[in-house]
Image (cartoon, rainbow, N blue to C red):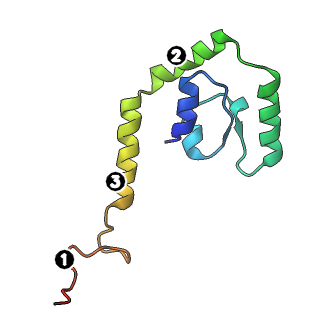
Amino acid sequence: MPIALLEALSFGLPVVASDIPAHLEIGLNDAHYFHVGDVSALADRLASFARSPWPLELREKTRNWLAEREDWRSIAERTLGCYRRAIEPRRGGPHARSRTAPPSTA
């Protein structure tokens, strides 16, 4: 979950994001995306948004658009799920953690 991107959108701010799958999943207009690693495209997107500040009406529309698609409780639950999956032991894999107690030194 691109939480910083979602937070910016929740304030109705114009955003620029790389075209990684997590960002694309948000479903913004193509004008908001640039190819990951393309510094020139990033600079162009930033300059474009800097030249055209978003009016209050567009900010409100952005906030409403996001509120219809996402809610913070769901975002928090999905993020927590990602963290839990990242720290749970891998069964049978080379990095699987033992569920037994460590050897005693006594």
- Of mark 3 and mark 2, the one earlier in the sequence is 2
Q: Which residue ends up furthest to the top in the rendered image?
A: 57
Q: Residue at x 41, y 35 (%)?
A: 75
Residue 19: x, y in percent?
Answer: 65, 43
How many numbered marks, from 0 up? 3
Foreground mark, 1 or 2, reads 1
- Disc 2 residue type (three-letter): Asn
The residue to which callout 3 is attached is: 84
Circle 2 SS class: helix
Residue 26: x, y in percent?
Answer: 55, 33
Residue 10 in the image: above or below residue 55 = below
Q: CA distance from mark 3 to mark 1?
A: 20 Å
The residue to which callout 2 is attached is: 64
- Disc 3 residue type (three-letter): Arg
Q: CA distance from mark 1 to mark 2?
A: 51 Å
Q: Which residue ends up furthest to the bottom in the rendered image?
A: 106
Q: Which residue ends up furthest to the left in the rendered image?
A: 106
Residue 81 in the image: above or below residue 13 = below
Foreground residue, 46 or 105? Answer: 105
Q: Residue at x 58, y 30 (%)?
A: 8
Question: How dense is the environment of label 2, judged by Cα within 10 Å: few (below 14), some, or many (20 and up)?
Answer: some
